[in-house]
Image (cartoon, rainbow, N blue to C red):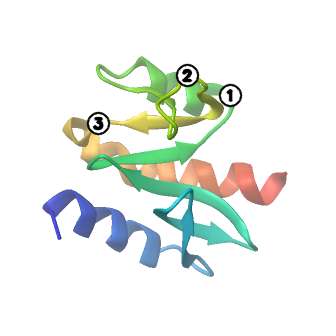
Amino acid sequence: MTTEETLYTAIGQNIKNAEQSQMFGKPCFKITGKAFICFFKNEMVFKLEGDSHKDALSLDGSQLFDPSGKERPMKAWVQVSATYSDQWPQFAKAAVKFVEAG
């Protein structure tokens, strides 16, 4: 397990009521059956809206999540480079709020 994957797992496990699962064959965490974070290509992916979405997408190397690689990104999901792993916990909390509200 890479350092990044270990951090991803720790972040997910520290969120109350989060359950480890799979989404598109990738590891994810869900709240009430809805995915809010996942791990892809050694980076963390977050389901975000509003300012959190804008802030995550503004980071160098961040991009909309395109798990198929066929230029069909998932607009609410932002893939954030491990360069910004110090910000992963705050984005995870924002993702939980988004999913719980919807």
Q: Amino acid at mark 2?
A: Lys
Q: At x 29% / y 19%, what residue is drawn?
A: 60
In this orientation, which residue lies closer to the viewer: 14 or 47? 47
Q: Do the residues under discs 3 and 1 have CB atoms within 8 angstroms?
A: no
**Foreground: disc 3 or disc 1:** 3
Question: Looking at the picture, how far across and down is residue 78, in whole percent?
Answer: 51, 34
Q: Do the residues under discs 1 and 2 have CB atoms within 8 angstroms?
A: yes
Tell me the number on the disc at residue 54. Answer: 2
Q: Amino acid at mark 3?
A: Ser
Dot 2 lies on which element?
helix
Which one is earlier in the sequence, the residue at label 2 or at label 3?
2
Residue 13 higher or lower than 46, as above or below: below
Residue 51 higher or lower than 88, as above or below: above
Q: Amino acid at mark 1?
A: Gly
Question: Looking at the picture, how far across and down is residue 98, in whole percent?
Answer: 71, 48
Q: Which residue is mark 3?
A: 81
Dot 1 lies on which element?
helix
